[in-house]
Amino acid sequence: MTKSKSANPHLTAEREAEIGELAEFIAEDRFPQKRVEPAAIAKSVGIGVIPGYYDDQFDGMLEHDSDRFFIYCNLDRVESLTTPRARFTLAHELGHYYIPEHHNALKSGNVPKHPSHCDHESTNPIELEADHFASCLLMPSDRFRKRAKRVADGLEGIRQLAGEFGASLTSAAIRYAKLDVQKCVIIKWNTDGYGWKWLSPTAYAEGWRKTIEEPAKLVPDSATEKIVSGSSSGGDIVSTGTTAAHWFPFVSVGSYGDCLLKEEAVSLGRYGTLTLLSLAE
Ligand SMILES: [Zn+2]
């Protein structure tokens, strides 16, 4: 089963909790009340960070060589070491360093190099674990929830949270859904079509699972259609009203579950489009 056809590719709850605790402990210990700086954490444990231009091969790569760890950071994809994408990449590679099983595999030489793409696209459990570590390190749950209460609902608020935590809009949106700040569904559209989705736990419990996955089925002039078709461009958030039956094929028109939804969409530039579905006010 490919990621694009699956719902959330979950780790077990136990594994997720274990990795989350590890990452959040490091965040709270090293950067209490302050934005977490993954490059400073790498430096403090003696990891060499090596920026370079490596085409599309990877975003980041952790390597163990001559008793030392190195993170290669691909500027062709992350642009500079301070972009949200670079920060997530560094945090992801720190996940491979701090998660004992990943660390030991690299150190033993069984897996001497670990190239990673930080697109939230992978279904490989090792990558999912490092992504989860990165999310928890950069956006510790207590702080994130506290700040989320003080910002607007929806994409506008998520954009503000992303700025405050130095995370990409996509990473902040996934964190928002996973922490169930609102009952919502996040859908990522790549430039060539559907990418993936994340459901908040309450959205999953509601039965909002399978969604439209073909751009051709989007409602004309809906927020997502306007962005995906290019009729609305730039970084503006477009918002339109919709219904559950429009988005979820298993919810029939006029049924109990066919509630009014707010559909918001925003362009991610070369990385596609992000849609957020939430309950209409
Ligand atoms: Zn990785």
Image: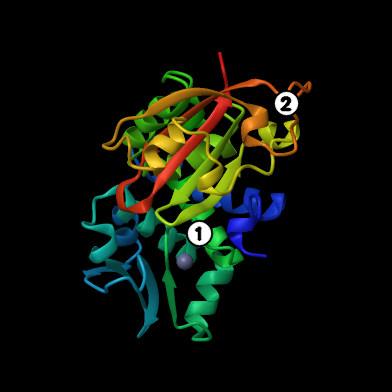
Is 60 or 246 nearer to us in this picture?
246
Percent coordinates x, y for residue 197 in the rendering: 57, 46
Q: Residue at x 26, y 74 (%)?
A: 54
Q: Secondary structure at mark 2?
A: loop
| Residue 140 visible | no
Find residue 129 and report its image quarter. Answer: bottom right
Q: Compared to 1, does 183 lie above or below?
A: above
Is 18 or 29 nearer to us in this picture?
18
Q: Secondary structure at mark 1?
A: loop
Badge 1 amino acid: Glu
Is residue 251 shown left or right of residue 178? right
Is 86 or 44 nearer to us in this picture?
86
Is 104 or 218 nearer to us in this picture?
218
Is residue 274 shown left or right of residue 36? right
Give the position of the N terminus as an image quadrant: bottom right
Please tell me whether mark 2 or mark 1 is closer to you in this view.
2
Q: Earlier in the sequence, mark 2 or mark 1?
A: 1
Which residue position holds label 1? Answer: 121
Which residue position holds label 2? Answer: 253
Find residue 99 and report its image quarter. Answer: bottom right
